Image (spheres, rainbow, N blue to C red):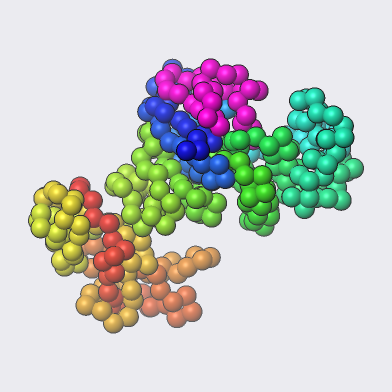
Amino acid sequence: MIAPALCVVGLGAPFGSAPGLLGITFDVAAGERLVIAGSSGAGKTTLLRAIAGLGPISAGRIEIAGRDATGLPAERRDAVYLHQTPLLFPHLSVFENVAFPLRVRGLAPAEVAPRVREALASVQLEGFADRPPRTLSGGQRHRVALARAVVARPALLLLDEPLAALDPELRQEVREALIALQRAYGPALVLVTHDLDEAGLLADRIGVLLEGRLAQTAPPAALFSRPASLAVARFLGLPNSVPGQLNGDGRFESGLGTLSCDPRIGVTGPAVAVFRPDALVPGMGPLAGRVVEVRHRARETIAVIAVGELRLEIRVDPVCPPLRGSELRFALNPRAVTILPA
């Protein structure tokens, strides 16, 4: 059996004098992209620095490429930590910036040149080897930093909000370069972000970091459609939350009627149904609400509808949205609903 590229077991890492991270356990396979999502101050950077050997830990074990790295210094961990702002040596050319990790490791010049050319080609900067960093665009500087991070072929790449400071066009450029690099070199990748769209675009799996613990780890589609708890659902920003009652035989009673649910939930009593706007299907349906607001966004148009005391968000046609004050009939897709004990 092939060992994971990264295995973290029961990791604790303090935030100054506070307990910080507690009981963090996960693993990442070679070539896999795990994105850790959390709000500002959740401990995302603390987690990366602990794995990289740049920050203290209070408990647990870290294995990298099958080797116990818990007590190893950062330079012996077979991992590269990349901060969100690319730090290039201004007095060195692009070639020498990328070559730097190889020269530190004592590789022969005959080995350095082809490795650097290969890394630059993988980020589409073949013709930039002799350029000084000051002549590069922001996206190009990020790509050089990525090439330098992988040129020594580490088992693990740790990225701290790598796209946070970029405008949307540069984000796309650097995101594509990152995915291409990882496919070419195959390191495990752990990336942290507070941006859920970025997490969904990059991740094979997403881990949600809440209150110092990993609250849920799942592929993007499963996470966004099936949050494991109300806390995760709220972090994900699922706007629709309908209180009701679980009766223990697989039925949930609420202001939207009766929904079938997984009887394995195994509880009775107060519960909450959570779902995204696209779980509601506008048009003909058994339910109706009054439109109280229409919100136009870059990627979608949302109507807020009142159904009794409930306020629900539903995705509508941006070209011909419903009028405020009008009645909107809709149906609820039960397969897109998650029911959680309150």
Q: Residue at x 51, y 23 (%)?
A: 68
Whether residue 281 is situated above or below residue 311 in the rendered picture:
below
Q: Is residue 58 magenta?
A: yes
The span picked out in magenta is 53-82
Does the stretch in magenta take in 143?
A: no
Residue 224's image quarter? bottom left
Q: Can see residue 245?
A: no
Residue 321 place in picture, x, y as percent: 42, 77
Say if 282 sits above or below 199 in the image: below
Q: Residue at x 50, y 35 (%)?
A: 3
Tell me if residue 280 can be seen: yes
**Which residue is situated farthest in the front direction here?**
1
Q: Residue at x 60, y 19 (%)?
A: 73
Q: Is residue 124 rendered to the left or right of residue 228?
A: right
Tell me residue 298's x, y (percent): 53, 65
Q: Quadrant of residue 211?
A: top left
Instruction: State the residue at coordinates (76%, 25%).
Output: 105
Residue in front for this viewpoint, 19 or 227: 227
Left or right: 199 as drawn, with respect to 151: left
Give the answer, above or below, for where 101 lies relative to 224.
Answer: above
Count of residue discs? 0
Give residue 92's position: percent from left, percent from top. 86, 33
Q: Answer above or below: position of 269 versus 116.
A: below
Task: Answer with left or right where residue 247 lies relative to residue 199.
Answer: left
Residue 283 drawn at (x, y percent): 32, 80
